[in-house]
Amino acid sequence: MSALTDDTLPASPRAVRDEMIVFVVMAALLAIVPATGIYPFFVMQALCFALLACAFNLLIGFGGLLSFGHAMFLGTAGYVTAHLLKVGQISFPYWAGHWVVIPLPPLSPELGIIGGVLVSALLALVTGYVSIRRQGIYFSMITLALSQLLYFIYLQAPFTHGEDGIQGIPQGMLFGFIDLSKPTILYYVVLAVFLAGFLLIFRTINSPFGEVLKSIRENEPRAISLGYKTDQYKLLAYIASGTLAGLAGSLKVFVAQNASLTDVHWTMSGEIVLMTLVGGLGTIFGPIVGAFIIIAMQQYLAGFGQWVTVIQGVIFVGCVLAFRRGIVGEVANRVGHSL
Amino acid sequence: MQALYAQLLVGLINGSFYALLSLGLAVIFGMLNIINFAHGALYMMGAFCAYFLLNLAGIGYWWALIIAPIAVGVFGMILERTMLQWLAGLDHLYGLLLTFGIALIVQGLFQNYFGSSGLPYAIPDYPQIGDWRGLQGGINLGFMFLPIYRGWVVIFSLVVCLATWFLIEKTRLGAYLRAATENPTLVRAFGINVPRMITLTYGLGVGLAALAGVLSAPINQVRPLMGADLIIVVFAVVVIGGMGSIMGSIITGFALGVIEGLTKYFYPEASNTVVFVLMVLVLLVKPTGLTGRAA
């Protein structure tokens, strides 16, 4: 069990104060981005994926569970938020030919986000209940299969518009007075949500709950013998991770203004894993660094077609064979304490 | 009724591919402790190998059936020697991530050069004996029309599956292999070269995948992504059946193919999802899988 961490994590205790300093520096750097002339759309997109990768890292880095289906939360929350913002009306069949229709007008941004997050929390509860019944490698295969199941459902469901996706989503006024269609305002809203989500994960990791999670990762039988109901802890961690991944998915709708099948596909799940692996599994800041690198790479190499896939594969192989600590993990190892 | 039998046959064919692939996954997992995510990509390479042999060297189907699994198997053994062997002793997850990366590289390269559309591969029309033209044409069985090639795929896959079962469960080599799965250190102490067995096992598993690829080339066309979605279904098959028993993998593979075929006839909307739904049901009722021991 512990082979995952022997090699990757520094043994020294967390230096929470140093980590907070890094956090403040990071927040300050991100806050001045609009003044530097960097394309804000790119940074917003990277921030959404950074939150997603951090949520994924909560599960693998601190719970030892490798989910290969995290795209399902990104895609589900995205579809729900996009649908609520653009159409509003909810209808689903309950018996052959009969439909329940809840007539709703297009909703405001905050209600759209709440809807997306609630649905992904529910999805995490259901899929988590099924998938934590098996451990290790089986857990990865089950989450992958479940996300593929959802992919096929979304391919056929009428409200997702199949291959076309939901396009042209209105950004609207957050709380009635914050105009999200202005790029600078949207940027700070995305940044605020990202920082809040990050702090929540940071707090979770450093809480007693996080300590129990780490003990499960290191040695589950021992955690059980100490009286912890490890299945409940794993399920809670899975739900927390899925819900935060859903938040990232809802947020991404405002940036990209569409929701499509790409976000539910297994290649997306693979990219989430890659971001976290490049940055450093089980590090605090690794997923953020990884997300920025992978998103930047996709931007610059967009013209090279399938070579992007090949390069991603090469990075996967290289990281696993020679660079298992990832960038931040490597730095943390040099500096001598956790990051 | 014709349509029902036709879908049952399609189900049996898909079931043969599930069986051949999950069998390979199970054998590889037993020896290497790795879930081979590259299995789908190697299945695709088998089909492409047959395509290249025909179009570049003029070597037909029957030789491809032998050459392609060996060629891809050798490629697999090189992968094992150069990369996978360094993961021994690490967490299982790294094997999954490494082979996922290999799958991305292989599929990306083939997509670059061959796009995403399918390349045709004809059903062989030789040997010609009397009215028989190789595996082309079909037989009227009275209740249905059976295309000969499809019947051939089902029967040949079944034979290969049973031969693999026999090799592992009933021969001396298989006994070494099973022993090395249980306790590699002890088997090495008896003077058996376990690392070489591991390499050969990976080659065998990969060869089975390539064989399935050659068999599927005339039916499904040759596409760079032909294995990408298939491997996820096969993962679900493996979760349902468990990787503890060889015969279990074979039976689960064929059974799920048939169930999928029946679903295509009775409720086509669910034919893509039925295997995943069954996986959820099995996990709720019997979390260890149908034949598996506790993982």
Image (spheres, helix red, strand yellow):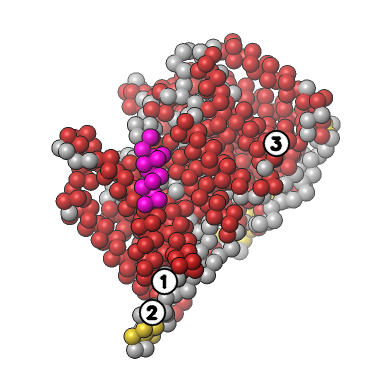
Q: Which residues are magenta?
A: B74-87
Between A49 and B156, which is closer to the camera in this rendering?
A: B156
Quarter occupied by the N terminus of chain A: top left
Disc 2: which residue: B126
Residue A242's disc is none
Q: Chain of mark 2?
A: B
Circle 1 or circle 3, nearest the eye: 1
The spot of residue B167 in percent (x, y) is 22, 56
Q: Chain of mark 1?
A: B
Residue, x 39% and y 61% (percent of image)? B68
Label 1 close to label 2 by CB (< 8 Å): yes
The answer to whether residue A67 of the structure is visible from this angle is: no
Residue, x 45% and y 43% (percent of image)? B99
Disc 1: which residue: B60
Residue A45's disc is 3
The spot of residue B20 in percent (x, y) is 35, 58
Q: Chain of mark 3?
A: A
The verdict on a common chain for dots 1 and 3 is no
Q: Say whether residue B75 is magenta.
A: yes
The spot of residue B229 in percent (x, y) is 50, 55
Please state which amino acid type lies under the numbered disc 3. Answer: Gln
Image position of B120 (left or right of A182): left
Residue, x 70% and y 40% (percent of image)? A299
Q: Main secondary structure of the magenta part?
A: helix
Quarter occupied by the C terminus of chain A: top right
Q: Say whether residue B225 is magenta.
A: no
Between A205 and A96, which is closer to the camera in this rendering?
A: A205
Q: Secondary structure at mark 2?
A: loop
Q: Residue furthest bottom?
A: B130
